[in-house]
Every structure is written in C-alpha cells, then in structure tokens.
Image: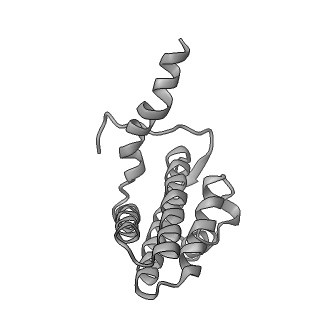
Amino acid sequence: MNSNAFCPISDKKINERVARLNGVFTFLLLIAYAITSNIFIISFLLIDFLLRSAELFRYSLLAILSRNILKLSNIKPKLVNAGPKIFAARIGVVFSFGVLLSTAFGGWNLVGISLISIFGTCAFLEGFFGICVACQIYPFVYKLFYHSRLVSEK
C-alpha cells in the first residue's frame, strides 16, 4: 500500500467486507455482461452504483445481498471510512454509464471492451485482494480538479 496515497474522508463508516463482496458481485456481473451483452446487467450496475455513490447504501441490491450473506455467515463487520468507497462508487457510475453508452450506440467496440476490462479489473482487485484502485487514483483526481481550484481561489 502506498503511504503517500490519500483518500476522501467521510464522517460515515462502511463495512469493508460488504464493499469487497460488492466488488466480487460486480466482477461476476461484468463477466455475465461480457458473455451475454444483456443491457439489463449493465443498467442494473449503473443504478446500483448510483445508489451507493449517493450514499443510499441501504437501497443498493448488491449491498443488501452482501450484508445478508455476511450476516448469515456470522462474519463480523470491519468498519472503515466510507469516503473512499463512495468515491469508488462514483467511478463505478462513470464506468457503468460509459459501457452502457458505448455498447448501446456502437455495439461491442474497442471503447466498450476497454472500459469493461478496466472496470472488471478494478472490481476484481477490490473483491479478491482488497485493493482499492480508486484510492490510488484519487490523489491525481484531487490535484486535477480540486487543488487547482483551491490555489486559484487564494
């Protein structure tokens, strides 16, 4: 883990185990989408990521499923700061929407395949290894969008 990386901070906590299981389900759904090209799968992911990115975790079907599986398995929660996971969900919205648009208007093209490959890799890393790619790219996003605003406001 890079000690120089930083993530958005939130006053909310989230169960990291739920987030990781969400990553596994996202990865599996992306594989199902790649095999079937069923537009409902990527649409479902878009809606689910929209809910999580708007901090409406309790309405996310993937989060509900993950929480219930962990509860039935008697796995204790591991609470972490929700900020990085909310940021990652927002990236998930962008990728879901990008895949949806690229495949809806262009079929399986290079853009759609590239987006689903990157998206799937990020979900795989989160789900199976607990590596939050969003945390790794957040410093660059911060510098690009927020830091320049702060400097120009001074």
Residue 62: % across, % down: 59, 71
The number of numbered badges drawn on the structure is 0
- Write the residue at 35% across / 37% down: 5
- Write the residue at 42% across / 72% down: 27
Whether residue 112 is visible to the viewer of this picture, yes or no, is yes
Q: Is residue 114 left or right of residue 44?
A: left
- The vertical placement of 122 against 74, above or below, is above
Q: Nearer the viewer, residue 47 or 105?
A: 105
Q: Residue furthest top?
A: 154
Q: Residue furthest bottom?
A: 36
Q: Residue furthest left?
A: 2
Q: Nearer the viewer, residue 58 or 145?
A: 145
Whether residue 71 is visible to the viewer of this picture, yes or no, is no
Q: Is residue 54 left or right of residue 84?
A: right
Residue 22: % across, % down: 51, 67
- The vertical placement of 38 against 90, above or below, is below
Residue 50: % across, % down: 63, 60
Visual colour scheme? one colour
Residue 23: % across, % down: 46, 66
- Write the residue at 48% across / 17% down: 151
Q: Quadrant of residue 11?
A: top right
- The vertical placement of 41 against 92, above or below, is below
Quarter of the picture holding the N terminus: top left
Q: Residue furthest front?
A: 106
- Write the residue at 54% across / 53% down: 90
